[in-house]
Image (spheres, helix red, strand yellow):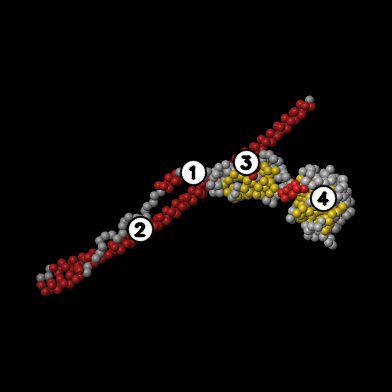
Amino acid sequence: MGEQREDLQRIVSTLANKKDEIVNFIDILKQTIRNVQVNSSNVFRELDKEFDALHSVLDEMKESMANTIQQERTEKIQALNNQLGQCSSALESSEELLECATTILNIKNPTEFSKAARQIKDRITACPAFRICLKPTISDNMSHLMVDFTLERHVLQALKFLPVPKVPEINTAACLVADNCVTVAWKMPEEDSRVDHFVLEYKKTDYDGLARVKDEQPWEVIDYVKDYVYTLSGLKFDKKYMTVRVQACNKALAGDYSDPVTLETKAFVFGLDDTSSHLNLKVEENYVEWDPTGGKGQEKAKGKENKGRSGASPKRTSASRSAAKGCRDRFTGESYTVLGDTAIESGEHYWEATAQKDCKSYSVGVTYRNLGKFDQLGKTNSSWCIHINNWLQSTLSAKHNNKSKTLDLPITDRIGVYCNFDGGQLMFYNANSMELLYAFKTKFTQPLLPGFMVWCGGLSVSTCLQVPSVVKAFQKSVNGLNSSTCSLYSVPVMPIESSHC
């Protein structure tokens, strides 16, 4: 019966998963239908817009040509009217002279006839009718009436929709995830000179599977990408994966999106455990600040969420602390310490801490969970740290097992921590220059928690960071160094002490 129950439970679980997949697919289909309706309406509008533009061009051409013809007609008619006026004037003059000549021909007296004939002869010789051109100066042909749209008509009749660009293919082999940047590369299945640009979309997720329509973050859009590769930089890797997709666009429309590709974005994500922090520390999200009021400022309840750092943190009761992760007492005495809320049990991790300008003393490191409430980082055999003291004089030192090594290096306000749990490597970097400050080589036997100590000032902790490429490259060279368990050394200097944890 037990086996049957287990088999039935597996079948029910499988059916439930399949049901969720079907529900998700139905949501996708409904969303696709809505998208088709919206996109078809957009296409209709674009079609009307293009043909209206074509009609506008033809109307402008027609108006320009009509104006030219009208101007030519006016000029020709004016010239012909001028010639007609000249001919009419010559005709009137000729008729007058003919009538006068006819009268003179009827004179009988020879003396009078001779005198009149001489007068009319001079007038007839100067008559405009003998000088006027009896040919039209302007042709009646319209020289600009030469429109032939035969070729254009054939072109318009062969007009088709601009083809939709093919779907790009994301080149996963060329995609790169490093240094909190994601480089996405893609290619077209065939060359298309009409592609104008690409649209890259991405969103963070905690699972490597099919996209969900509901309960999903919206796509972040990078538009007008001209190249076939794009690098997303300055990212916060607070999710395990990033899903990307690309679409190609020409001057008129966009093609379908490529198949989504999910890229793994490993990063160490943790917060500060304010339930166990010293009462003289005010902890808000990833910021810790020394509070000289002795925790009195934390007795006030917080107002609305997401206020600035000026808001006071609430004082947790013993019941709330016991329910919190870690279930430990607060640090007290001179141990102005706060720990991370997520333990490191394997793998490689990296985070950074940035000190405020007025910070007098602070430590950045790691510790086992058994750090006592009066203990300070680096003063036990289960904690390691870099300590910076800006009180009276500035010093930089590495601490472990209540032993300290002063480092003759420039003081930095930004420290990077690299922890290779399985390899037993703990390295501290100047996060501004990525210069190695100090390295511990040991064998970690218990889970590690990030630890921070601050006095007279504040620290900002940066999480969701990947192991930088420069750190990965450098730590490989350190792997060849041999040292005893739980030794303290400065790379490449040999271990200065060996002790067993």
Question: Where's residue 375, x and y in %?
Answer: 88, 51
Res 325 seen here: no
Instruction: Provide the residue designation for mark 1.
Output: 160
The N terminus sits in image quarter: top right
Earlier residue among tags 2 and 4: 2
The C terminus sits in image quarter: top right
Q: Nearer the viewer, residue 494 or 490?
A: 494
User: Mark 2 packing: few (<14 Cα in 10 Å), some, or many (20+)?
Assistant: some
Q: Which mark is residue 226?
A: none
Tag in front: 4 or 1: 4
Residue at the spot 76% in from the left edge and 29% down from the top edge: 6
Res 195 seen here: yes
Tell me how far mark 4 sits from mark 1, CA to CA. Answer: 76 Å
Q: Which mark is residue 494?
A: 4
Which element type, helix, strand or loop, lies under badge 1? Answer: loop
Tell me how far mark 2 sits from mark 4, CA to CA. Answer: 104 Å
Instruction: Provide the residue designation for mark 3.
Output: 259
Question: Where's residue 431, x and y in %?
Answer: 75, 54
